[in-house]
Amino acid sequence: ELAKAKETMPEIHNKATKIKYPKSAIDNGKKDEYQTVLLKHMKEKKPYLKEDITLKDLADELSIPPHHLSIVINERLKQNFYNFINSYRVNDVIEKLCDPAHSEKNILNLAYESGFNSKATFNMAFKNITGKTPSEYKRSTNNWFSENSEYPAIPIFFRLPLQGKTTILKNRI
Protein backbone atom coordinates (compact mmCIF):
# COMPACT_ATOMS: atom_id res chain seq x y z
CA GLU A 1 0.00 0.00 0.00
CA LEU A 2 2.82 2.43 0.81
CA ALA A 3 4.48 1.74 -2.55
CA LYS A 4 1.16 2.35 -4.34
CA ALA A 5 0.66 5.64 -2.44
CA LYS A 6 4.14 6.82 -3.45
CA GLU A 7 3.35 6.03 -7.09
CA THR A 8 0.22 8.20 -7.07
CA MET A 9 1.87 11.15 -5.28
CA PRO A 10 3.45 12.65 -8.43
CA GLU A 11 0.04 12.49 -10.16
CA ILE A 12 -1.58 14.36 -7.28
CA HIS A 13 1.26 16.89 -7.21
CA ASN A 14 0.99 17.46 -10.98
CA LYS A 15 -2.77 18.09 -10.71
CA ALA A 16 -2.27 20.58 -7.87
CA THR A 17 0.37 22.59 -9.76
CA LYS A 18 -1.34 22.39 -13.14
CA ILE A 19 -1.28 25.65 -15.08
CA LYS A 20 -4.76 26.89 -15.94
CA TYR A 21 -3.94 27.68 -19.58
CA PRO A 22 -1.08 25.28 -20.42
CA LYS A 23 -1.41 25.66 -24.21
CA SER A 24 -1.76 29.41 -24.15
CA ALA A 25 0.18 30.84 -27.05
CA ILE A 26 -0.26 34.34 -25.73
CA ASP A 27 2.82 36.06 -24.33
CA ASN A 28 2.89 38.67 -21.59
CA GLY A 29 3.37 41.53 -24.04
CA LYS A 30 0.22 40.54 -25.90
CA LYS A 31 -1.65 40.16 -22.60
CA ASP A 32 -0.58 43.70 -21.65
CA GLU A 33 -1.79 45.00 -25.00
CA TYR A 34 -5.12 43.17 -24.77
CA GLN A 35 -5.67 44.36 -21.21
CA THR A 36 -5.03 47.98 -22.14
CA VAL A 37 -7.35 47.77 -25.15
CA LEU A 38 -10.03 46.04 -23.06
CA LEU A 39 -10.01 48.55 -20.20
CA LYS A 40 -10.00 51.52 -22.58
CA HIS A 41 -12.92 50.01 -24.51
CA MET A 42 -14.88 49.39 -21.30
CA LYS A 43 -14.42 52.99 -20.22
CA GLU A 44 -15.10 54.64 -23.56
CA LYS A 45 -17.68 52.40 -25.28
CA LYS A 46 -19.45 50.96 -22.21
CA PRO A 47 -20.32 47.57 -23.72
CA TYR A 48 -21.56 46.41 -20.31
CA LEU A 49 -24.71 48.46 -20.87
CA LYS A 50 -25.86 45.77 -23.34
CA GLU A 51 -27.80 43.34 -21.18
CA ASP A 52 -26.99 40.35 -23.39
CA ILE A 53 -23.25 40.96 -23.91
CA THR A 54 -21.19 37.78 -24.15
CA LEU A 55 -17.50 37.06 -24.11
CA LYS A 56 -17.63 36.43 -27.85
CA ASP A 57 -19.44 39.73 -28.49
CA LEU A 58 -16.84 41.67 -26.53
CA ALA A 59 -13.98 39.78 -28.17
CA ASP A 60 -15.44 40.57 -31.60
CA GLU A 61 -15.72 44.28 -30.71
CA LEU A 62 -12.05 44.25 -29.70
CA SER A 63 -10.84 41.97 -32.53
CA ILE A 64 -9.32 39.67 -29.92
CA PRO A 65 -9.79 35.89 -29.97
CA PRO A 66 -12.37 35.01 -27.27
CA HIS A 67 -10.00 32.53 -25.61
CA HIS A 68 -7.31 35.22 -25.31
CA LEU A 69 -9.80 37.70 -23.87
CA SER A 70 -10.88 35.11 -21.33
CA ILE A 71 -7.25 34.53 -20.33
CA VAL A 72 -6.67 38.26 -19.81
CA ILE A 73 -9.81 38.69 -17.72
CA ASN A 74 -9.12 35.58 -15.64
CA GLU A 75 -5.34 35.91 -15.15
CA ARG A 76 -4.78 39.65 -15.19
CA LEU A 77 -8.03 40.94 -13.70
CA LYS A 78 -8.63 37.92 -11.44
CA GLN A 79 -12.30 37.63 -12.39
CA ASN A 80 -14.52 35.62 -14.63
CA PHE A 81 -16.24 37.36 -17.54
CA TYR A 82 -19.60 37.89 -15.84
CA ASN A 83 -18.11 39.26 -12.62
CA PHE A 84 -15.96 41.58 -14.74
CA ILE A 85 -18.98 42.90 -16.66
CA ASN A 86 -21.14 43.13 -13.55
CA SER A 87 -18.52 45.16 -11.70
CA TYR A 88 -18.79 47.82 -14.39
CA ARG A 89 -22.56 47.66 -14.20
CA VAL A 90 -22.51 48.10 -10.42
CA ASN A 91 -20.16 51.06 -10.84
CA ASP A 92 -22.61 52.58 -13.31
CA VAL A 93 -25.52 52.12 -10.87
CA ILE A 94 -23.50 53.72 -8.07
CA GLU A 95 -22.66 56.72 -10.23
CA LYS A 96 -26.37 57.12 -11.01
CA LEU A 97 -27.35 56.73 -7.34
CA CYS A 98 -25.05 59.63 -6.53
CA ASP A 99 -26.27 61.80 -9.41
CA PRO A 100 -29.18 64.10 -8.52
CA ALA A 101 -30.43 63.80 -12.11
CA HIS A 102 -31.37 60.18 -11.33
CA SER A 103 -32.74 60.76 -7.82
CA GLU A 104 -36.36 60.13 -8.81
CA LYS A 105 -35.63 56.75 -10.44
CA ASN A 106 -35.92 53.57 -8.42
CA ILE A 107 -32.86 51.42 -7.96
CA LEU A 108 -34.10 48.56 -10.13
CA ASN A 109 -34.67 50.89 -13.09
CA LEU A 110 -31.11 52.16 -12.67
CA ALA A 111 -29.91 48.55 -12.69
CA TYR A 112 -31.74 47.82 -15.94
CA GLU A 113 -30.32 51.01 -17.49
CA SER A 114 -26.86 49.82 -16.46
CA GLY A 115 -27.14 46.50 -18.29
CA PHE A 116 -28.57 44.13 -15.70
CA ASN A 117 -31.49 42.05 -16.91
CA SER A 118 -32.37 40.39 -13.62
CA LYS A 119 -33.13 41.78 -10.18
CA ALA A 120 -31.56 38.75 -8.50
CA THR A 121 -28.30 39.05 -10.46
CA PHE A 122 -28.16 42.78 -9.76
CA ASN A 123 -28.73 42.37 -6.02
CA MET A 124 -26.17 39.57 -5.76
CA ALA A 125 -23.51 41.43 -7.78
CA PHE A 126 -24.10 44.69 -5.91
CA LYS A 127 -23.80 43.03 -2.50
CA ASN A 128 -20.68 41.08 -3.53
CA ILE A 129 -18.94 44.21 -4.76
CA THR A 130 -20.00 46.82 -2.20
CA GLY A 131 -20.76 44.67 0.84
CA LYS A 132 -24.21 46.30 1.05
CA THR A 133 -27.55 45.79 -0.60
CA PRO A 134 -28.48 48.50 -3.10
CA SER A 135 -31.01 49.99 -0.66
CA GLU A 136 -28.50 50.00 2.21
CA TYR A 137 -25.97 51.66 -0.06
CA LYS A 138 -28.45 54.31 -1.19
CA ARG A 139 -29.47 55.05 2.42
CA SER A 140 -25.84 55.39 3.50
CA THR A 141 -25.17 57.72 0.57
CA ASN A 142 -28.21 59.84 1.38
CA ASN A 143 -27.14 60.04 5.04
CA TRP A 144 -23.66 61.08 3.98
CA PHE A 145 -25.12 63.86 1.82
CA SER A 146 -27.32 65.22 4.60
CA GLU A 147 -24.41 65.25 7.07
CA ASN A 148 -21.83 66.64 4.61
CA SER A 149 -23.80 68.80 2.22
CA GLU A 150 -21.00 71.35 1.84
CA TYR A 151 -18.71 68.81 0.15
CA PRO A 152 -18.87 68.56 -3.66
CA ALA A 153 -17.82 64.91 -3.89
CA ILE A 154 -18.48 61.72 -2.02
CA PRO A 155 -16.14 58.76 -1.76
CA ILE A 156 -17.37 55.48 -3.17
CA PHE A 157 -15.57 52.32 -2.14
CA PHE A 158 -15.77 49.16 -4.18
CA ARG A 159 -13.67 46.81 -6.22
CA LEU A 160 -13.06 47.92 -9.75
CA PRO A 161 -11.85 45.42 -12.30
CA LEU A 162 -8.54 47.23 -12.58
CA GLN A 163 -5.68 45.00 -11.48
CA GLY A 164 -7.94 43.45 -8.80
CA LYS A 165 -7.21 46.29 -6.34
CA THR A 166 -9.63 48.26 -4.22
CA THR A 167 -10.05 51.70 -5.69
CA ILE A 168 -11.68 54.85 -4.38
CA LEU A 169 -13.69 56.81 -6.90
CA LYS A 170 -14.88 60.33 -6.29
CA ASN A 171 -17.98 61.42 -8.12
CA ARG A 172 -18.51 65.13 -8.64
CA ILE A 173 -22.00 66.39 -8.08
Image: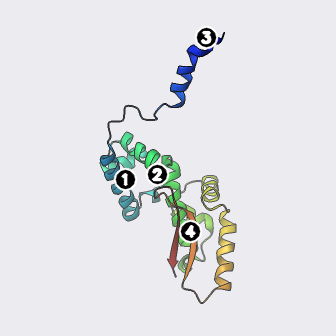
For marks 3 and 2, give the one nearer the viewer. 3
Q: Quadrant of residue 132?
A: bottom right
Q: Which residue is mark 2?
A: 77
Q: Earlier in the sequence, mark 2 or mark 4?
A: 2
Which element is circle 4 on? helix
Residue 128 % position (x, y): 62, 55
Of 50 and 147, nearer the camera is 147
Q: Which residue is mark 4?
A: 94
Which element is circle 3 on? helix
| Residue 115 visible in rendering | no
Q: Which residue is mark 1?
A: 35
Identify which amino acid the numbered label 4 is placed on.
Answer: Ile
Identify which amino acid the numbered label 3 is placed on.
Answer: Lys
Residue 7 % position (x, y): 56, 14
Q: Do labels 2 and 1 touch, CB within 8 Å? A: yes
Q: Quadrant of residue 136?
A: bottom right
Of 56 and 7, nearer the camera is 7
Q: Judge left or right: residue 27 versus residue 141.
A: left
